[in-house]
Amino acid sequence: MFQAIINDLARRYDARVFEPHVTIHVGADRLDAAEQALTAAARECKFIRLKPLGIDESNQFVKTLFVEFAVTAELRHIAETIRRSAQDSLQYELKPHLSLLYKKLRAATRRQLAASITVPFSEISFDALRAVRCISPTQSPADVEAWRIVAPAP
């Protein structure tokens, strides 16, 4: 479902297509730490269930249009497991969301899009963890295109 929305919005607004995902940790760029962290987190859970709170928008490129999710104890635990396993002292603030569009748009357009999309599920399951190397902060379509999976969960 989300991939279809992302594909449609990308086509309509000449934006990049990307895989739907929820970011749960941003940390140091260390491949060994990423692999260890994902192994530890994968032992803890097989899939994550999140409750969507609604569609929102912002002027941040990486949060142009997005589904906001409630933070759960399980998600907090997984994020902390990854942070601890990666030996990462960065304090990423967990605000789970699934982006639907990365594009600089006028506020009125973003608001109109947010109002036009509904999430038809009361709960959404995610079944994969991956470490992704990305340019930080991601601010352009080229930055999105440069994202690379560096460690899939075992």
Image: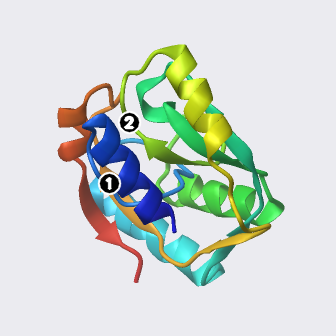
Left or right relative to 65: residue 55: right
Disc 1 target residue: 18
Q: Nearer the viewer, residue 93 or 9?
A: 9
Give x and y (percent) for residue 114. 62, 36
Q: Are marks 1 and 2 in contact (CB under 8 Å)?
A: yes
Q: Is residue 53 above or below residue 62?
A: below
Instruction: Tell me which label, 1 or 2, sits earlier in the chain.
Output: 1
Residue 131 lies in quadrant: bottom left
Residue at the image position 51 percent from the left and 69 percent from the top: 1
Residue at the image position 48 percent from the left and 75 percent from the top: 128
Residue at the image position 44 percent from the left and 33 percent from the top: 62
Q: Is residue 133 above or below residue 45?
A: above
Q: The residue under label 1 is which amino acid type?
A: Phe
- Helix, strand or loop at label 2? It is loop
Give x and y (percent) for residue 80. 65, 55
Residue 31 lies in quadrant: bottom left
Left or right relative to 5: residue 76: right
Residue 26 in view of the camera: no
Specify the label residue 102 is tagged with: 2
Residue 55 lies in quadrant: top right
Residue 116 in view of the camera: yes
